[in-house]
Image: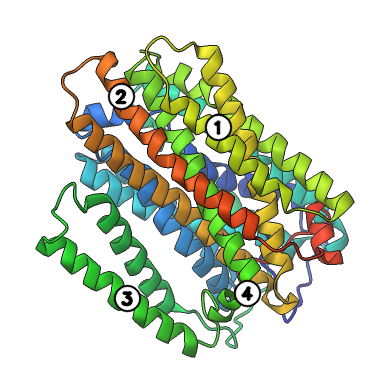
Amino acid sequence: MTMNTHESLTVTTAPSQKIGIVMLPLMLVLFISTLDQTIVATALGRIGQALGDQAAAPWIATAYLLTSAVTTLIFGKLGDIIGRKPVLQASIAIFVVGSLLCALAPTMLWLAIFRALQGLGGGGLSSLSMTVVGELVPARERARYQAVLGVVPALAVILGPLLGGLIVDHWDWPWIFLINLPIGVVAFLLIAARLHLPRHHDRRRTLDVGGSVLASFFTASFLLIVVEGGQGFAWQSAPILALSLVAVASLAAYVRVEHRAPEPITPLHLFKNRIFVISSLLFSLSTAALFVGMLFVPLLLQNVFGLTAFAAGSSIVPLLLGLIVATMVTGGVISRTGRYKIFPIVGAVLTSAGLYAFSRVDTGTSMCAMLIWLSMMGMGIGCFIQVTVLAGQNAVEHKDLGVATGALNFFKTLGGAAGSAVFGAVLAAAYAQLPGPGPEHAVHAFQQVFLWSMPLMGMALILAILLPEKPLSEEAMQIAEGKIEVPEY
């Protein structure tokens, strides 16, 4: 997680401010916003059955990721303009309302729409939590409080699939979203009563609304083309041609708007930097592979091997633990040596090996073998995470560090959204061609998902080999050691 700060803004915290009381609601909102990225992973099968649309189930994850990617950038800047407390409270309100509507959704289409609404609030929660700590706590003490907050997302990532499986096994899928209501309400009230920030309206800052809207239009239309083209609609059909026109027009308009925007959401000059471009692509590809493992392995275990949702969720813990361990190890090695190029190469090989193993899975495959494959994938993806962020940050000037970090995280979230949507379409197409029901046939559909995800790591391997290794700056070394946080946007 990163922190949003501005050198032009000086904050004086009241001596009577009780940081501990404020930390609790910040931890709660950060927990539920991160939790909702993974809690649906083990519940997709049950939700698809309940709403009668298994093929569209991955859009439950995609919709949330898509909208949260954009609002992560927007709400951070909006907090600088009108104040962080009201923007944080608005984010909580949007998230809670979206959660309630998700629980009441009558169809898969409405659930995807309400998840998109929920993601609008979720993106604000994740971007503002660290920012508030940065405003409340003196610089020398921030590391201690940010370390506490930093544990929360990791905990939520691991608990999400377990909690989602437990809920759908013993209650019903709407409770996945209803549990956010009491947590969100408590956090809202505590922040209203206990969070006291200096009032400021920084009119010098401008919000890139045009760029944000156009980026959303392009991303949504592009994903729909990839998912529906050749499946729901023929490539030459009117809907696909219309979506293509929207994608091209919105991209062209986006480039023009970003050239003129005083504070663009993604400054175009960053993309003239080879290291930054490759780092962004690697971050996106590795996150797509992560979501293939998080979403489709639990579905495989439920639909083919007959595991409960909770058991399926428990099975991907090795994936997440491998990711966390590899991220910590690579960060430590990089901080000592300053070298990073080898890690994404190793990561691409490990992740490819895990995906290939899953592409050969059959009804006789042992659970022990699959857990080993998941651990291998987790360690491989973990080799990307720290490197792509550090290399991208190290490649830009200090004045661009915040927007570069925000852009990297945007591409990360975009990769997750694209991975869940595209390979959900692959699974749906493979299911449609099965000769009959039963696990012995269903396993072939999942084999196609993992087989077709391997080219992601093929591209990642080529990009990792092409990635120049620039000596890390002193600031980048401190980031690798976890000593400092980085402004995001």
Q: Residue at x 48, y 38 (%)?
A: 38
Q: Quadrant of residue 388?
A: bottom right
Is there any visible trace of residue 98 in the rendered image?
Answer: no
Q: Nearer the viewer, mark 3 or mark 2?
A: 2
Q: Quick check: 374 left or right of 306?
A: right
Instruction: Residue under label 2, please give it.
Output: 444
Q: Residues within 10 Å of mark 3 (few under 14, many from 20)?
A: many
Q: Quadrant of residue 242?
A: bottom left
Residue 19: percent from left, percent from top: 76, 52
Q: Residue at x 88, y 60 (%)?
A: 140
Compute the Cα span from label 1 to label 3: 38 Å
Residue 276: percent from left, percent from top: 62, 67
User: Relative to the observer, which residue lies in front, 224 or 310?
Assistant: 224
Instruction: Residue under label 3, please give it.
Output: 250
The C terminus: image quadrant: bottom right
Q: Residues within 10 Å of mark 1 (few under 14, many from 20)?
A: some
Q: Against 486, is 347 above or below?
A: above
User: Relative to the observer, which residue lies in front, 166 or 248?
Assistant: 248
Q: Amino acid at mark 1?
A: Ala
Q: Secondary structure at mark 2?
A: helix
Q: Secondary structure at mark 3?
A: helix
Q: Residues within 10 Å of mark 4 (few under 14, many from 20)?
A: few
> Which is nearer the N-term, disc 1 or disc 3?
3
Q: Quick check: 115 left or right of 132?
A: left
Instruction: Residue under label 1, please give it.
Output: 353
Query: Which disc is residue 273 wearing?
Result: 4
> Which is nearer the N-term, disc 3 or disc 4?
3
Q: Against 253, is 379 above or below?
A: above
Query: Which disc is residue 446 wearing?
Result: none
> Which is nearer the N-term, disc 2 or disc 1?
1
Residue 479: percent from left, percent from top: 79, 57
Compute the Cα span from label 2 to label 4: 42 Å
